[in-house]
Image (tube, rainbow, N blue to C red):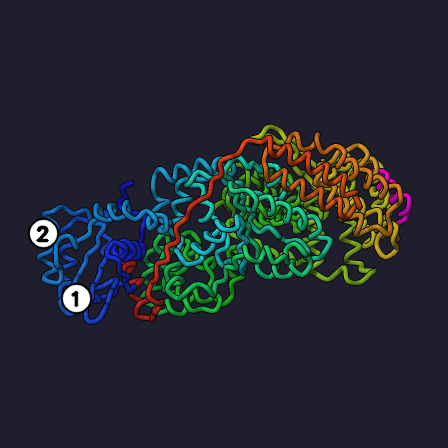
Amino acid sequence: MTYDFSALSAADFEDLSRDLVGRELGIRFEAFTQGPDSGMDGRHATGGNNTILQAKHYVGSRSADLNRTMKRERAAIDRLAPQRYILSTSCRITPKNKSILAAIVGPALQTEADIVGPGDLNGLLRSHPDIEKSHLKLWLSQTAVLERVLRAAAYRFNSITRQEIEEKVRVYAPNPSFDEARLKLDQHHLLIVSGPPGVGKTTLAEMLAYAHMAEDWDLVAIRSLDDGFADFDETQKQVFYFDDFLGRVALDKSALAKLDSDLARFIKRVQKSSNTRFILTTRAPIFEEAKHHSEHLADERLDISRYLLDVGVYTRRIKARILYNHLLVTGTPQSHINTLIVSGMLPKIVDHRHYNPRLIALMTEGSRIANHDPANYPAAFIAALDNPTQLWDLPFRKHIPTTCRNLLLTLFFCDQFGADIDVLREAFDAFNAELSRHFGTAHNPKDFEESLKILEGGFITIRGREVNFVNPSVRDYLSAYLDDLTLLNLAAKSAKRTEWARRVWQHSQRLGIHKTKDSSEAAALALNFRVVAEAFLSLPVQKRVETRHGFGDTMDGLSNTDRIELLAEWWFASREPRFVELIEALAASPVQGWDSWRDGGDLFGIVSKLRDSDWLGELPNALVTAKRVEDGAIELLESHSYAPEDLTRFLDAEEEWRVGLGERLIEVLYEAIESEFRDVADTVRYMDTESTLEEHVEMLEDLAKRASIPTSVLNEAKDIALRRKYELEDRSSYSASYSSRNVDRGGDSFDDAALSNLFAPLLRDNG
């Protein structure tokens, strides 16, 4: 591959030059920021001998322009008087040009070969391919690599464009976190990126994903572990990416119950497969709190794979480069750039206690800041860092029409990972109409389309049929804005779907109206869900969708057990008899039947809670309802409509809720476990990977221990599984080989003068 280096900024080109020339010469260059008359971007000093490297990023410029610059540099070069001077440039030069340059540089240049042009740099890249890989921005700019990334992204993100990838790569500021994270991911197959909001977790995860996709790994972005299990294919190289995997769940034992054991099982499967990698991101406070409630998340074996990305690991130099890249790439008006540089505010921004890559991105985005008076831009930048939530306040309240605000409020209560455009339209039409009636504002049938057009790019992104916030900070801002009981009551009245209803109800808990048993505010809010509650008996819990493996079922609404628990919460808040009638109807006839994966252990929990006065036992006819749910659980087990791994979850629930469970339910569960050992030959017949069989054997061992299965029965089942394992052909494994840069920059001294010098090349005429 031959590069023209146009994808690199001047600072990036300096880094590349130091790495390549230093490697070729077998020396390490200290890093120096470009500055007036400094004459060097890298220095190697041993004893009294100095080797000076200077990098000139003049891609697309004429050799005459480079000659003029070097004439101005001559005095600085003579003053430094190095034993050896090396010039690296991206300007295309001929042998004749080199001779002219050599005369300009003077005696410090030992030979014309010490003028390293783009052809020479490409030769060095071929000699040192690990440096090519380590400079991600350079490597990913290759046409062939970009095509591979686009092909790999097409299945999940069918509207992602080359321009989007190029812009993300160009704005990325390389830092030690990438190499460390990549090494951990390669070693453990698992990476949990944790850190405060806006620190760059998603950016790091995306760069890791792009690097893998460029090497023909298939990206599988998942919204739930159900998606992960459904798409897992050990015969293919797969990178699973689960952004914000703990999401917005209430971090208590019941909220984590479903995620907990499934996450551990999925991680175990990933770590056993040489063809699989798993990247997760989560906010640091949520992860830390979750560990207190989850034995699996607190497991030391997960901690070794965890990478805590904190803004504290960003040196002053890296923070400055992040700001520099954004000013260079994101369309910041030149007038604003000039004012910012000459204002003297750059050190205050880089050193600010709230410095955050997300805030930097927002405050350099051209379309967002174009309305700022250039003269006031530096002060506005500092003000945004002082009070980050205010970034969205003025644009939200003053710069968009009411219908656009209503659409953003609607999107907030949709899936946090993005809303299908048809689902969003349905929710918006209802909520917008309710808000308009209440506040006396006009609305019309075109509000949805017009609002989408206005908001796209500024507040939301639209990819294919999916709509999401352009930045997580929009959701953070709206979260506080929606701490308003009037808005929540209107949202409750307009709810059309089960998940929307639960999200509105959960958000209301922030207001503290549920703390007292007889809260009139909580009762009024619960009663506003009566319309959607009626639909709980008909709205689907899953739908049939086409995947690359054929057709399959995916979640589409709350599970039946979740619906029962939500209806119970509304009854306790309001004492409305209709909620109890709906609970009884669902218990007798669940929508699309009970599901072993989604309802599973929750069936045991509901049965026990209904028989316990401290839980749901206060509900009218609680014991009758408990019997109906229990009969459903028994029927589910007797029908064998469950996957083998579901038995572990059933057994977990039985051990947790045993006190309130009937003898027959417990008996049927243990019969199902015994049946799993008897039918092991039929089960393993369809398993076609060694790791899947090994995982199944581990599950059998766990079930045998907990369900008192005789050792002889266990050994026989294990023998059958092992025989199946031996039948499988050996599969070739693939292990990604990454090279860490391990480039020592010689410390990170980066004072105000160096900071100013870094940004100096961005200072240009406004025109």
Q: Give the mark toward the camera: 1 or 2.
A: 1
Question: Element under label 1?
Answer: loop
Q: In terms of image quadrants, where is residue 266?
A: top right
Q: Can you identify the residue that label 2 sits on?
A: 99
Residue furthest to the front: 712
Label annotation for residue 529 = none
**Which residue is found at the position 23% from the left and 67% from the top?**
45
Q: Can you identify the residue that label 1 sits on?
A: 82
Residue furthest to the top: 550
Q: In terms of image quadrants, where is residue 48?
A: bottom left
Amino acid type shown at disc 1: Pro
Residue 631 falls within the magenta-colored stretch:
yes
Q: Which residues are magenta?
A: 618-632
Name the chief secondary structure element in magenta. helix
Q: Position of residue 629 (x, y in %)?
A: 84, 41
Q: Nearer the viewer, residue 675 or 177?
A: 675
Q: Position of residue 628 (x, y in %)?
A: 87, 40
Question: Element under label 2?
Answer: helix
**Which residue is found at the position 13% from the left and 59% from the top?**
109
User: Is residue 542 among what the camera can see?
Assistant: yes
